[in-house]
Amino acid sequence: MALINLDIIPGIDKQNTTKGAERRWIDSDNVRFRYGLPEKVGGWASLVDKSIVGVVRAQHPFLDKDGNRYIALGTDKFLLLYFEGQLFDISPLDSSRRQTSCTLATTDESSSVTITTGSAHGLAAEDIILLDSVTLPSGTGLSASNFEDQSFMVVTVPSSTTFTIQSTNKTTLAAAAATGTVSAGGSTTVEFYTKVGPQKQTYGYGWGVGPWGGTLSTAATSTINEGGTFSDSDTTLTLTSGSAFPSSGTIAIGSELITYTGKSTNDLTGLTRGALGTSAAAHSNGATVTDATDFSGWGTALPANQTTLEPGLWSLDNFGEVLVATIANGETFTWNAAAAQRLEVRASKTTSGFATGSNPTASRLTLISPTTRHLIHFGTETTIGTSTTQDDMFIRFSSQEDINTFTPTSTNTAGTQRLQDGTKIVGALKAKENILVFTDNAVYVMKFVGSPFVFGFEQVGTNCGLVGKNAAIEVDGVAYWMSTKGFFAFDGTVKTLPCSVEDEVFDNFDNTKGQQVFAGLNNLFSEIVWWYPADSDFNNKGVLYNYAESAQIPGGIWSLSTESRSSWIDSGIYQKPYATKFDTSLSGTFPVILGQSGLGQTKYFEHEVGTDQTNEDGTVTTVTSFIQSYDFDIQGEASAGDNFLSVSRFIPDFKTIQGTADVTVNIKDFPTSSDTASETTPFSITSSTTKIDTRARGRYVNVKIANANANEAWRYGTFMLDVKPDGARGG
C-alpha cells in the first residue's frame, strides 16, 4: 500500500473537466481560500430587528464632525439612514407634486379608501404617498389617527385624479374596514415620495412604463372590470370600455406588460402574461389599463430590441458631513448631519447651505472628486434643468468646493466633457487621486490638472467596459471590475484578470441585468466578491477572488457561493463588513408602509460573525458549505486510466475544525460517470479523528468536504489516502 498526499492547488477550476483539472478543486459553495487553504466562510448576524422594504443596492458609510457613524442606504423606493443600530427614513419628498384639499371616500365593510386629487396626480400602483392634515368625513367609522402622518402604498389608480389605498390599523397593521359608505368628503394633503426606479432590471421596454416615469398621458386607458381580482394566469380580460383599444396589441397594468391577439367588445383575448421581460402579477378590480401598443416616446412601450429598463439605483457620497444622494437618471439631494433634529429631517434639494436646486435634473450617477471636492455628474444634461437633453456620455462638474454651481465662468472651475468610446457611462470609481470612468466599452482616467481645463481625460482601455454601476472596486490603488467580456484590473495598465471559473459565471449570467451586479471588498481576507444574477431576476450567486494570493496561481484563486447579496460595504468605520440580502417573497417592515405588499424585503447583516446566519428575531439559519476535488488516479502511469485503484483508508488533516466536517470519498469508472460514494460515507470528521477506514474501488476518485449543521466550521489542510493498484477491468 502507498500513502499518498492530496496536495491540491488553491482555487476552483471550472474551465476544465473534472479529470482535466488536475490538482485543482472543481466546485465549492461558501468557501474561501486563505494562505492556500480552503475554509468555510464566516457567518453573519442581523444588525437591526426590522427588515427593509424593497431591495437595497447602495450603501455609503460616513462620519460627522463629532465622530458619529452613519450609513446611508438607497433602495428602489427609499433613502434610509442606519445610525446606532436603528433605521431612519430620510427619503426626499417631491414638493412639486404636493396636493392639498384632497377628499376621501369609503365603502361599507371595505378597507379600500379612494382619494380624489384636485389635478392629475401621476401615480401608479405601488407608488408611495404620505398623508398629512387629515380630517375624515363623518360616517366612515375610521379614525383620522390611522391616516395622519402615515405612508401608504397606492393599490389601484382608477383615474388620473383618483387612487386607492388600504385603510390599516397602524398599531397592528391589520386592514381596518370602514363601517359606512361615504362618497367623498373630509380633507387631506398628499405628499409624494420621490420616485427612484424599478425593483429589477428589465430588457424590452422603455423607462416610464408602469410606475417609473409617469403615465402614458395620451394613450387610451380603461379599468379592469372583472368583478374580482384579475389573476396572474388569466388569459382573457374584461375592460370597463374597450372601444379605444385596437383589435390586438399590448397593454400595461402597473409594471406588467401584456400582449393580446383579439378583442370582442370589452374583452381582450389571447393574453400573453408578463410580456417583454416583465413579470405576471395579480391586479385588483378597477386597476388602470393603458394601451401601450403604438407608443415609442417617453414613458412608453418599445420593441424588445431597443432598450433596457434599468433598476432603481442611487449614487451616495459625502461632502464633509453632508450626504449627497443622486437617483439614477434623476435629481440630487443632500442631508446634513449637522442639522438640528437631523434624524427627523428628510434629504432635500433645499438643505440650508447645501442646496442642489441648480444641479442637473437627470444624471446616470454622481460622486465627489477626491481632494478637489467637485461634485461630478456623469451621463447628464447638456442643458441644466432640461432632462430631455440628458446625454449618456456627457460629464458636468461643479466649481471646486461648491456643489451647486455648474455653469462655467472665468472665476470658477465648473466645466464639462463628453467621452467618445461607448454608448453610455456606466460607472465611476475613485482611485487614489484620480477617477476611473467606465463606459459600456472603455475606461478613462479623469485627473485634476488645474486651470484652465480643470480635469484631463485619458482613455486607458477599450473592449473592457463595466457591466454595471456597482461592479467595480478599488483596492490599494488597483481597480478590479466585471465586464460582459470577463474580469479586468487596472494598476496603470488595463489587464485581463485570469479567471478559472469564468465559464461558470458568464454562461449563467444575464448581462441585460448587469446593473444589479455588486462588487464587495472584504479586506479582512484579501477578498473581492461579485454578487450577480444567474438565470434570475435578482442576485443569487457570488464569485470570490483572492487578490493577494492569486498572482502565482494559473487562473487565479477563485471560489463560488450560492448566497446572495444586493449590496456590500467593507470594514472601515465599522469593524466588520455590512451587507444586504433581498428576498422577493416576503414583505419588509421598515419603513412602515401601510397596505404594502409584493415589494420584497431586505435583511441587513454584519458579516464574519460566528458560523451561521443569525436572524433579526434571534433564530439561526444554518450556513452550509462544501468543496470538491478533481477526479484523480494516483498511479502516476500513462496507462493509469486503464487500471482500477482501491482506497482503504484516509487520514484527515484539518487546520481547524468546529463541530464536524463531512467527508465523502467518491468513485467513478469514467470521467463522465456520476459520482458514487464509497461505503458508509459521508464520514463525520471531528478534531479528534485520526484516520478513517473505507472501501472504495474505481478508475477515478475524488474527495468532497462539507458541513450541513449549525455551529460548524472548518479549514482543510492535506488529506492522505491509502491506495493500491487493483487490476484492470473492461467497461
Image (cartoon, helix red, strand yellow):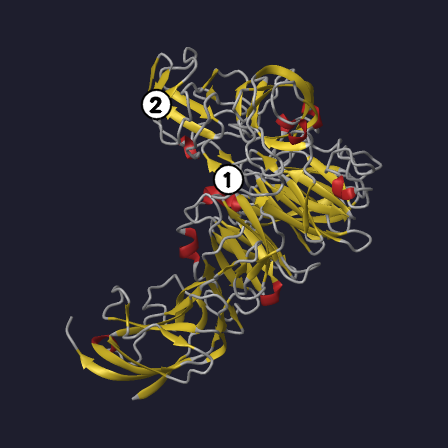
Q: Residue at x 26, y 64 (%)?
A: 674
Residue type of the residue flagged with mark 2: Thr
Bin the neighbour count of mark 2 within 10 Å (Cα to Cα): few under 14, some 14-19, many 20 and up: some
Q: Mark 1 highlights which residue?
A: 200
Closer-to-camera residue (434/350): 350
Residue 270: image x %, image y %?
A: 32, 24
The N terminus - image quarter = bottom left
Dot 2 and dot 1 residues touching (CB under 8 Å): no
Does residue 290 show up?
yes
* Residue 492 seen from this side: no
Q: Position of residue 673 (x, y in %)?
A: 25, 65
Residue for point 46% across, 26% down = 284
Give the x, y percent position of residue 419: 62, 40
Circle 1 packing at 10 Å, graded few (<14), some (14-19), many (20+), is some
Q: Quadrant of residue 503?
A: bottom left
Q: Residue furthest left?
A: 730
Q: Secondary structure at mark 2?
A: loop
Q: Which residue is mark 2?
A: 236
